[in-house]
Image: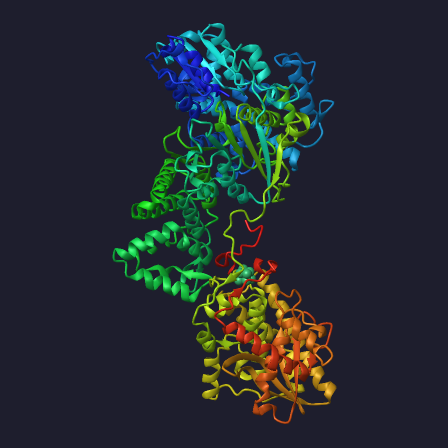
Amino acid sequence: MEPFLSQVARHYYSNTQIGKYVFVFPNRRSMSFFRHYLSLAVKDITLNVGAVANGGRARPLIVPKMYTFGDFMYACSGASASDRVTLLLRLFDCYRKVGGPGNADSLDEFIFWGDVILKDFNDVDNYMVDPKAVFTNVTEFRQLEDTSYSYMTDDQLEAVKAFVHHFKEGGQMKFDPSGEGIKSSFLQIWEILYPLYNEFRRSLMDEGLFYSGMINRDLAERLSEESVTDILSTAFPGASKFVFVGLNDIDKCGKTVLTKMHKAGVAEFCWDYSSDMIKDAGNKSTFFMKDNLTEFKPSFDIDPAGVTVPRINVVAVPSGIGQVKYLPKIFSEISQDISKVGDLVGGKDCAVVLPDENLLMPLLNTIPEGIKDINVTMGVPLSSSAIYSLMKDVAELQFHLRKGKEGMMFYHRPVWNILKSPVMTAVIKFEKENGDDAIEGLLERLNRQKRYYIPYSWFQGSTLLETVFKPVITDIALSDASQIKAFEEYLLGVISYLAPRLPDNLSTEKEYARKYWGCIMRLRENTLPVKPSTFAVLLERVLSTESVAFEGEPLKGLQIMGPLETRALDFNNLIILSCNEGVFPSRGSSPSFIPPSLRVGFGMPTYEYDDAVAAYNFYRMIQRPSNVWLLYDTRTEKMLPGEESRFIKQLSYHFKVNMKRMVAEEGLNTAVAEDFVQKPSDIAQRMKDIKLSATSMETYLSCPAKFYYTSVEKLKPKDEVAETLDNAMLGVVYHGTMQALYLGGIAMNPGFSLDKDNIDEHVGDGSLVPLKEITLKYIGEWLKRKDEIRLKVRSLIEEQLNIPEVSGRDLVIEDIIVKYVLKTLAIDKAELEARGLDSFKVLGLEKECHWKFGEWRFKGFVDRVDSFGGVMRVVDYKTGKVTENDCKIDDSNAREVAEKLFGEDVRERPKIAFQLFLYDMFMEKDPLSAGKELYNSIYSTGDMFTNHPVTVKISQQFVSIVRDEKLPAILKEMSDPDVPYRRTSIEDQCKFCDFKMICGRNPKKDN
Ligand code: SF4
């Protein structure tokens, strides 16, 4: 189908006066395409459908002037709108002047609803609503019959009556307007909106400032006194005609201007409205257009032969990013030669429409290499840049400053985020190469000590780190202009230091840095007596409007754009992502103080307008392509139900379009891992050097590939600073407290380190004499010293988390650990009493044990070895649940347990069977066990409050099966270079595996 703009270009090219015409479009991109189609006409090139311009003869052309509709209105009026922050600050001044309710001195409070008021004033003006009527004073409102309201239409009066009824009945207020409650608070603001509107406009006019609605309204009102042709000839000297191309939703000011121009015979209109679906009376897409067509007849017949319904494919994808990953498949359908996708000729032209901006960066990172030319019409927002993320963390750094013993300290999270940022990494590299010798040592210390709060002094010595890690905010709750000035200076200082040091491959980030710098400079023009958090909100608002154009040759290559940018444009291949209900069309409408009933009564936009705009854009963009792909995310996420867009449902049920439906497979285009990892050729030797443990053997049995990463390659997950105690840390604290209790003496002092060297040192100098016997009396005393146990637990938590004090959720965990410790003491006491003993012997705590099995060596730490009379116990404290069934290994089930233990990909592998076997092997030759019966005792925190610890004697038959049969076989397999490491086929295990990314076995639904 011939593109709409091409038809317009051909039509007007034949007009010799075109050089004197002014063309007005809905957006800039359509101007570029129109220029392109005009140039095709000039060159007498056959357009897409084979039509030949000007009967086959080329004619030179003076390119006409082109504007967007917004710019056209500004050009007519000779004014332009001020930026949002200036308007907001001015509005705040006026708000205070008219005595707005609430804390009128606090810009911090005002800022959140100031924007809402600005938008409402804009709507009031764009729709030429009488402000006095719409902001009716409820308190003074009398009777409908009162002639003083005759300036309102009947509809308006009805709307006002319904609105006032919420507050008044029979002329009497239903509640105290100066009281509390939502209605009172609303009314307090409502009653000042009219004076505020007047004051705001007056104050802006005094200084020659404007907001866009104000400009448009003033222009429209001028037309009742001035001739439109006079205004136009001043704004556009020499222009003879104005052609409005591809518009749809036009507000009342715009309509007023167009009507005057139409009557004066200087305006022509080209409406993009051809398909049966877009014209369907039941379709919201007709909402604006039916009036447009009535009021402004089209200048010529677009698509005289009609348009056909494209081939539509609907693809359900079980992830957001998955939609992006599906694109290469579509590109290969468009052209087998992927470098041709996006070519404007030959039907390969292609646009990807992104209703969800968040998919832009993943999309840019996924475009196949073969596609060289890309045009991102929507611009890449500053908020998606690395500079933006970095500066957000730099601001965060200031919001979480803390004063401690070591001076000002930074919260670790923003510090690490900053250091990990690609921008910072590049600048650190630059600094090192250019003589910053201190930086390496400072970073090494940060890495080594992993502090929760990091002292400011740790960054001294490196100019870069001193510039970034500098405490600036002195009081986060203070609304103070000088503090904000210092904050601005600091942010400018950081950005000015970083940007010039960025390497060429981050040149786009330099551009973002320049924009960021400009935004702060704009804010700096104002005095802002606000809290730092309010400043951050303001900065965010300024930054949110900034983007960097990501354009090559504008008419070449794959086009990526938001739904609004598609207006007036046509592509043969159209791919729309995020066709989800709630995304396209989006859900809800923007906040407003003007209730919907009043908006309807006064002809102001409501949520219906937004729906109608989205419907028009959707049905317009699918009018002329040959192929359309609609992709949607099937997951239910946040507030979105994973439901396809109503547009897809309408196509299916209302328009009965025959669509091809597909479900994309999960894990699209992720690196597909082989089922095996090859062993290193020297594995036999390396295995001899590895000290195996119960954990490493259990790892091998559950996933040999994971054993390879952890034990052979010795890879470790990145050691990050923990925010709160995890299960492993909880185990360490519980183990540590029990160890300290049974070591006795100073070991229970908070702050006494249970590090082996520290214990040896104190044992060596005699300050710690480890207990040999634990008596009933000793246990009984500690059972009463709960607070001292708590202090020990607390100090161990602080040590684990590297924090100065335990708070929040960790206090709850502290309480839980104290309960575990007291229960463990109570269990030991009960054990003694049951056996009629007064004490038990401690034979070892955190005892290091070894076992040599042929050429293989095993090592482990036993939590506790004790002796109750002639019984020796190997005690294991387990955080989690271990039941009798897990430990029950007797002669009757020995073979079955061994088979399950060593089987491949067994889902219910016996939990602790190998550990029990290994502990027996550790103790077998230990002199301590001579003449004693050996038992394993499992103190499981998941079970200790309901059951006595499981104490078992392991089956000798099981020991023989493992030692003589299963273990030699598995160790042989582990050392055989010809047997590769198998990856588990139980993918559930991969979800929580630390190596899932390097393994290539990305668990599904991980996006
Ligand atoms: S990701 Fe899965 S297959 Fe890979 S090492 Fe981890 S558990 Fe094994």
Taking 52 as reference, is 618 left or right? right
Taking 866 as reference, is 854 left or right? left
Location of residue 78 in the rendering, given as x and y in whole percent from the top left corner? 39, 18
Image color mode: rainbow
User: Where is 746 relative to 125, above or below?
Assistant: below
Front position in the image: 735 or 976: 976
Find residue 699 and report its image quarter: bottom right
Farthest residue, direction front:
978
> Image point 50% across, 16% down: which residue?
254
Q: Quadrant of ligand 1?
A: bottom right
User: Where is 677 relative to 648, above or below?
Assistant: below
Q: How many marks?
A: 0
User: Where is 583 relative to 696, above or below?
Assistant: above
Find residue 28 and report its image quarter: top left
Location of residue 24 in the rendering, given as x and y in whole percent from the top left corner? 44, 17
Front position in the image: 326 or 741: 326
